[in-house]
């Protein structure tokens, strides 16, 4: 059986919201909330948190040690290289990228990408982030570590390597990639559940505190709460989402 490793890339040096990954809600940092969610996946065998060697990230390594979660440290800027090192340190055959700025990622949606990848058997990458559909913060990618390694060896462009699997996604002539679109009730690109700024954090904080002490609530429950609180849901619509330039319309 292939070894499936979830990789979470985080660092303390966010330009717009420094230290966000360790910002607490109900005493639990965003990284801890996300780890709790990822552990609910039915298919993931191990989790590795990939951060940089910069001293400011020591707090992340310490937190992971206390959680019993492997922390790999690599380059601050070469995210692709850091990801590959982290996955190889776990002996991973299949990588599952879980974006560190999406602390409420739904494990059922993560598993949908993994299951499609396993059942299809011909894809190099299956994700739900290549086209607008699911709310941001619910994105993940399941990919072949072998194909990902090949992609890292084909480019030294720092602007590409900064975005992890970007080279793999941008070369359909070399790799087979599939984007999974959401069912109609979850097709909500108007909702942003990723944390780029403090405006985003306040939305996540409100959701977590409203649904506490549970940590297994679904995207459907999140959307129900936000639809009942439309002013809250719209409070971060002005935030620039830099990743949108890499999505198809």
Image (cartoon, rainbow, N blue to C red):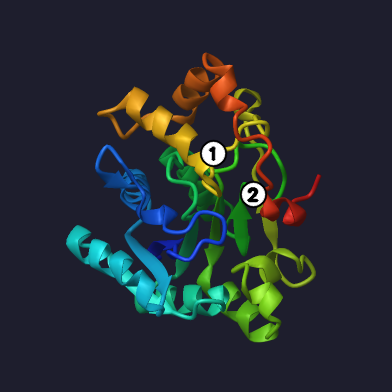
Q: Nearer the viewer, residue 116 or 87?
A: 87
- Give how far apart the Cα atoms at labels 2 and 1 are: 22 Å
Q: Is residue 197 above or below residue 173?
A: above
Label 1 environment density (alpha carbons within 10 Å; few <14, some 14–19, many ≥20): some
Quarter of the rendering occupied by the C terminus = top right
For mark 1, what is the residue? 199
Corner quadrant of residue 11 = bottom left
> In the drawing, does residue 131 fall left or right of residue 222?
right
> In the drawing, does residue 120 fall left or right of residue 95?
right
**Mark 2 vs 1, N-terminal side:** 2
Q: Is residue 3 among what the camera can see?
A: no
Q: Residue 120: x and y, percent?
A: 59, 53
Residue at image point 36% right, 70% down: 57
Residue at image point 66% right, 25% down: 184
CB atoms at circles 2 and 1 under 8 Å apart?
A: no
Q: Residue 64: x and y, percent?
A: 26, 63
Q: Which mark is residue 129?
A: 2
Q: How many marks?
A: 2
Q: Secondary structure at mark 1?
A: helix
Quarter of the rendering occupied by the N terminus = bottom left
Label 2 environment density (alpha carbons within 10 Å; few <14, some 14–19, many ≥20): many
Q: Residue 30: x and y, percent?
A: 37, 48
Residue at image point 32% right, 59% down: 45
Q: Is residue 209 above or below residue 46?
A: above
Corner quadrant of residue 164 = bottom right
Q: Nearer the viewer, residue 216 or 20?
A: 20
Q: Residue 224: x and y, percent?
A: 50, 18
Q: Secondary structure at mark 2?
A: loop
């Amino acid at each position: 059986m292939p070894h499936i490793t979830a990789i979470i890339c985080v660092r303390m040096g966010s330009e717009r919201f420094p230290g966000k990954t360790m910002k607490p809600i109900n005493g639990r940092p965003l990284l801890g909330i996300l780890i709790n969610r990822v552990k609910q996946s039915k298919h993931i065998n191990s989790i590795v948190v990939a951060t940089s060697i910069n001293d400011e990230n020591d707090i992340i390594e310490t937190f992971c040690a206390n959680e019993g979660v492997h922390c790999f440290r690599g380059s601050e800027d070469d995210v692709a290289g850091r990801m590959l090192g982290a996955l190889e340190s776990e002996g991973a055959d299949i990588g599952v990228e879980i974006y560190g700025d999406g602390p409420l990622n739904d494990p059922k949606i993560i598993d949908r990408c993994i299951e499609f990848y396993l059942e299809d058997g011909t894809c190099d990458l299956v994700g739900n982030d290549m086209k607008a559909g699911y709310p941001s913060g619910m994105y993940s990618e399941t990919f072949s570590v072998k194909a990902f390694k090949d992609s890292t060896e084909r480019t030294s462009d720092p602007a590409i390597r900064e975005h992890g699997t970007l080279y793999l996604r941008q070369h359909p002539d070399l790799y087979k990639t599939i984007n999974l679109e959401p069912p109609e009730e979850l097709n909500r690109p108007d909702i942003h559940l990723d944390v780029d700024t403090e405006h985003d954090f306040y939305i996540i904080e409100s959701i977590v505190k409203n649904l506490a002490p549970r940590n297994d609530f679904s995207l459907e429950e999140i959307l129900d709460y936000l639809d009942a609180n439309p002013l809250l849901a719209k409070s971060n619509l002005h935030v620039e989402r830099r990743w949108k330039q890499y999505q198809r319309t």
